[in-house]
């Protein structure tokens, strides 16, 4: 990926949420969330179970009915056509059913759907994008294997490649590290850093707090509300993080990185 | 010696209880009655007709919903069908005996409730005669006055129907379709036997069984002179491809039996002579 | 483009070729099998009656079996993709029960009144079956309040199927002389398929195939989950509605012409997937071919095994398809992977 010069003059907002409320069934899960996520940054959303993180991500991706407004790259999402939104925003869900019968290559190619004219076969550009995405997740070697024959971690990498193949400006990922072993978790980390350097926006929901602290910004949620927003290096963010988890964790600095360790 | 044995038999006859009845039905079950049943429920139309043919209609207290001949049975309480009899209604009528088909599922239930059941099956001409005799025995009507006399009448009518056909009409090749499928009546079926008795040939040989489901192509090859069709076969609606070229179709030599006529023709019971007459009339008309 | 990427494509290509070749062979065989068992089609040149039999009866029947099988295979692939359920078959939305009710009702009413009779004669039993199938699907859609919720659709389909089946049973009970004819419908038969029926099925097959192929991307997207499919910008409600229409039309036509033939719609996509793993664009076409071959083979056996008696085709499709699936399952058991 060719690096583009950072947009230092104007910090554009990738996703702008205003008073977003959402319900799951009869329960209010999000209570009037207002959030501005900056472009070319990696933002992590953290919080205890049931805080509404996945719901917020879905609302930001336009996959959930909600009240309030969400704007994607300056445009109100409600008025965008599905395909236009799909070209600019890629979403990777948690525990989504997987197409066991498709090969890894075919699954990754599905990520190109927003770019393909309705009845056209994949173009050379599509194939190139899929190859890039599969190589980025180290899945290129076994691209001909059906998903049903892959391990959990390998499958996750293919799904990740699918999300990458969209080559969208904004990437929303819900628990992207599920089933991944440490080397591949590190690979994911490096890949996200590279994406951000090249100008893409990444928003992830992670329950691996130490990985979440590697991001540029942190959004802390509890009970359907945002309790804190700030840079990952800030002490205030660390205190808010410890606070939301009832001080059962402590944030430490080690080898140039921030770590969350259990407070025993 | 002869006189002595005659005296012995006479003694036994005197000692044996009067009107005691023992019958083995078609399941092989032996049923005993203290006296001839006066309250009878019938769950098969042909058995209903047999009881009435032996002039004991008044003994019927209940029939199945499909029994419709003679007209008097229509006013009797209907206790369900052969496949789904209303056990409670039957028992409430307090019958002395229930006569039904061997295939009925009610036999065991009724017997466990203490109701006597006689199961009879009529699949061909010989069966009709046998069942008439059994019913005659059940109704305690001596054979000479009842079953045998009735059978002789039926037999004579059958012969008369056969003779009413001109020699040209005989040896016609006939195809009888029982229902859509096509399911045909073979030589070994009840209808097939009547056709044989009338002297016509059935295009379905006995080797195929009584009601085979045949390939419509077979009928085209056989090219019957005459087709007989029950109303339920819906000939008008079911158009088998390739049949428009059949001789019988082109010359409209098709008899379609209406609902009432179908009832007569299809039931293996005492009206089989009338069935033969209906079929003979069809053959004579369409020859 | 690397080797393994095209490996599945090549497999798909060869499978298609194989199935087309099998179709041609079965067509030839079907024309030769009839009421006298195997009967060479060469004989027809000398015998005008044999020629009539081959042209008017055997050819449309065999072709009809192929087309009906293709429709069912297509509908099966669509149903399994739409409901994301490998056990889905084309009759899920109640079309089978609707068709049965249509036929049973028509048979019961025939001859009851002259008005009903003339109406029914014009409609024909095939018309009654088709109308019944389509109405049943509409009823399902009504109960499910649209196509949005897959689970609700499935549930509504099951309910409609059960209720209409019960009504059909009731009619059969009240008119037991219809039962034997209904049996021939319930177990399926190509005996009523003439050239008109073939033309109708061919036209419907062409339409549904094109429509399903155009929606194949939606089916692929759905395989990844509804949320992901939505995030890829697929217009799910419209595509789902179109796919349900394809299901209703395809199944209704097949059932109207040949009766209820089970297992073809269920087995054909699985049989294809056991050979090649591919996206819905190719799967739909291959499943149609597979279904066509399966049904044609079963029909030939049904006609030839006990000639001139006919066995019900539905029994043979189950035997053929089921045996092969069982063998596949047995073979895969060792490897531990799913079908």
Image: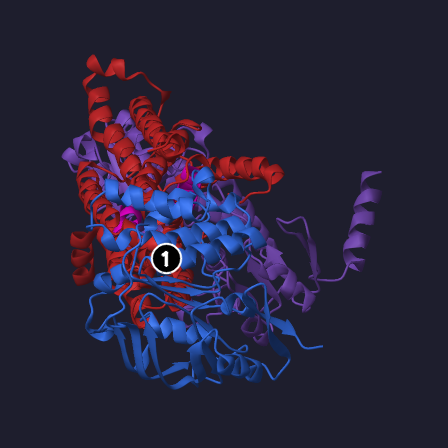
Chain colours: A blue, B purple, C red
Q: Measuring 37% from the left and 82% from the top, which residue is drawn there?
A: A22
Badge 1 crowding class, 10 Å Cα cut-off, few under 14, some 14 to 19, many 20 or more, is many
Helix, strand or loop for the magenta stretch, by majority: helix
Q: Is residue C146 above or below residue C203?
A: below
Q: Tell me if B76 is positioned left or right of C128 in this view.
A: right
Q: Which residues are magenta?
A: C249-273
Residue B3 on image: x %, y %:
81, 42
Q: Measuring 31% from the left and 46% from the top, which residue is drawn there?
A: A129
Q: Is residue A232 above or below residue B103?
A: below
Say whether residue C260 is magenta: yes
Nearest the camera: B133 or C106?
C106
Residue B132 on image: x %, y %:
53, 50
The total of numbered circles placed on residues is 1
- Residue that mark 1 sits on: A195
Nearest the camera: A263 or C222?
A263
Nearest the camera: A113 or B39?
A113
Say whether residue C93 is magenta: no
Q: Tell me if B6 is positioned left or right of B240 in this view.
A: right
- Image quarter hosting the N terminus of chain C: top left
Residue C40 on image: x %, y %:
31, 16
**Protein chain holding label 1:** A
**Residue A82, picture quadrant:** bottom left
Q: Measuring 62% from the left and 60% from the top, which residue is drawn there?
A: B107
**Residue B180, picture quadrant:** top left
Residue C188 on image: x %, y %:
37, 44
- Residue C279 visible in the displayed image: no
Nearest the camera: C117 or B93?
C117
- Residue A131 visible in the displayed image: yes
Element marked by disc 1: helix
């Amino acid at each position: 990926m060719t690096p583009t010069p950072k947009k230092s003059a104007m910090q554009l907002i990738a996703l702008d949420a205003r008073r977003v409320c959402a319900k799951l069934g009869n329960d209010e899960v999000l209570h009037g969330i207002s959030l501005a996520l900056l472009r070319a940054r990696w933002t992590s959303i953290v919080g205890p179970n049931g805080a509404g993180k996945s719901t917020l991500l879905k609302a930001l991706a336009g996959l959930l009915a909600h009240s309030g407004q969400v704007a994607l790259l300056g445009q109100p999402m409600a008025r965008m056509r599905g395909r236009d939104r799909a070209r600019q925003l890629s979403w990777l869900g948690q525990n989504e059913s997987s197409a066991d019968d498709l090969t890894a290559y075919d699954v990754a190619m599905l990520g190109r759907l927003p770019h393909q004219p309705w009845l056209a076969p994949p173009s050379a550009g599509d194939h190139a994008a899929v190859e890039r995405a599969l190589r980025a997740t180290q899945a290129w070697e076994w691209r001909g294997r059906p998903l049903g024959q892959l391990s959990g971690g390998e499958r996750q990498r293919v799904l990740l490649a699918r999300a990458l193949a969209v080559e969208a400006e904004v990437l929303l990922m819900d628990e992207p590290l599920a089933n991944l072993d440490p080397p591949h978790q590190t690979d994911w980390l490096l890949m996200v850093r590279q994406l951000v350097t090249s100008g893409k926006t990444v928003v992830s929901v992670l329950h691996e707090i130490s990985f979440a602290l590697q991001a540029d910004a942190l959004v802390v949620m509890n009970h359907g509300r945002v309790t804190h927003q700030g840079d990952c290096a800030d002490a205030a963010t660390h205190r808010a993080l410890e606070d939301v988890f009832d001080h059962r964790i402590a944030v430490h600095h080690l080898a140039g990185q921030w770590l969350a360790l259990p407070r025993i | 010696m002869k006189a002595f044995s005659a005296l012995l038999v006479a003694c036994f006859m005197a000692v044996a209880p009067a009107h005691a009845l023992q019958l083995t039905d078609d399941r092989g079950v032996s049923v005993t009655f203290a006296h001839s049943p006066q309250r009878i429920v019938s769950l098969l139309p042909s058995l209903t007709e047999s009881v009435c043919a032996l002039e004991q209609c008044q003994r019927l207290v209940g029939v199945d919903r499909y029994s419709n001949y003679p007209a008097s049975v229509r006013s009797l309480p209907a206790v369900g069908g052969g496949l789904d009899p209303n056990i409670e209604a039957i028992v409430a009528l307090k019958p002395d005996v229930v006569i039904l088909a061997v295939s009925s599922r009610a036999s065991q239930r009724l017997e466990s409730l203490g109701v006597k059941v006689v199961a009879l099956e009529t699949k061909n001409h010989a069966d009709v005669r046998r069942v008439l005799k059994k019913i005659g025995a059940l109704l305690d009507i001596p054979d000479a006055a009842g079953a045998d006399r009735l059978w002789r009448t039926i037999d004579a009518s059958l012969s008369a129907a056969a003779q009413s056909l001109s020699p040209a009409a005989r040896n016609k090749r006939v195809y009888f379709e029982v229902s859509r499928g096509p399911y045909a009546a073979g030589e070994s079926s009840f209808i097939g036997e009547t056709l044989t008795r009338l002297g016509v040939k059935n295009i379905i040989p006995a080797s195929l069984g009584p009601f085979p489901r045949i390939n419509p192509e077979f009928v085209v090859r056989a090219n019957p002179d005459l087709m007989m069709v029950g109303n339920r076969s819906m000939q008008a609606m079911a158009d088998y491809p390739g049949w428009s070229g059949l001789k019988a179709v082109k010359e409209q030599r098709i008899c379609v039996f209406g609902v009432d006529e179908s009832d007569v023709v299809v039931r293996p019971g005492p009206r089989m002579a009338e069935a033969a007459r209906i079929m003979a009339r069809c053959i004579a008309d369409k020859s | 483009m690397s080797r393994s990427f095209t490996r599945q494509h090549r497999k798909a290509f060869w499978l298609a070729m194989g199935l087309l070749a099998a179709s041609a062979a079965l067509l030839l065989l079907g024309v030769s099998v009839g009421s006298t068992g195997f009967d060479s089609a060469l004989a027809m040149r000398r015998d005008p009656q044999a020629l009539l039999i081959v042209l008017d009866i055997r050819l449309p029947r065999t072709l009809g079996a192929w087309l009906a099988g293709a429709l069912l295979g297509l509908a099966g692939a669509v149903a399994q993709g739409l409901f994301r359920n490998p056990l889905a078959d084309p009759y899920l939305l109640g079309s089978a029960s609707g068709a049965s009710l249509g036929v049973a009702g028509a048979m019961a009413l025939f001859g009851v009144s002259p008005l009903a009779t003339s109406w029914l004669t014009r409609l024909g039993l095939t018309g009654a079956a088709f109308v019944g199938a389509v109405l049943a699907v509409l009823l399902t859609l009504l109960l499910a309040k649209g196509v949005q919720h897959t689970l609700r659709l499935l549930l509504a389909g099951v309910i409609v199927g059960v209720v209409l089946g019960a009504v059909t049973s009731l009619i059969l009970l009240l008119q037991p002389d219809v039962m034997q004819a209904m049996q021939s419908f319930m177990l399926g038969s190509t005996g009523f398929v003439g050239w008109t029926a073939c033309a109708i099925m061919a036209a419907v097959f062409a339409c549904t195939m094109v429509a399903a192929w155009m929606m194949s991307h939606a089916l692929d997207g759905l395989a990844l989950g509804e949320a992901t499919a939505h995030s890829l910008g697929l217009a799910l409600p419209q595509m789902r509605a179109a796919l349900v229409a394809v299901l209703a039309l395809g199944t209704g036509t097949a059932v109207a012409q040949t009766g209820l033939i089970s297992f073809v719609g269920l087995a054909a996509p699985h049989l294809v997937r056991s050979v090649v793993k591919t996206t819905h664009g190719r799967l739909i076409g291959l499943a149609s071919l597979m279904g066509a071959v399966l049904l044609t083979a079963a029909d030939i056996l049904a006609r030839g095994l006990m000639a001139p008696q006919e066995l019900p085709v539905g029994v043979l499709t189950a035997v053929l398809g089921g045996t092969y699936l069982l063998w596949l399952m047995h073979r895969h058991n060792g490897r531990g992977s799913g079908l």
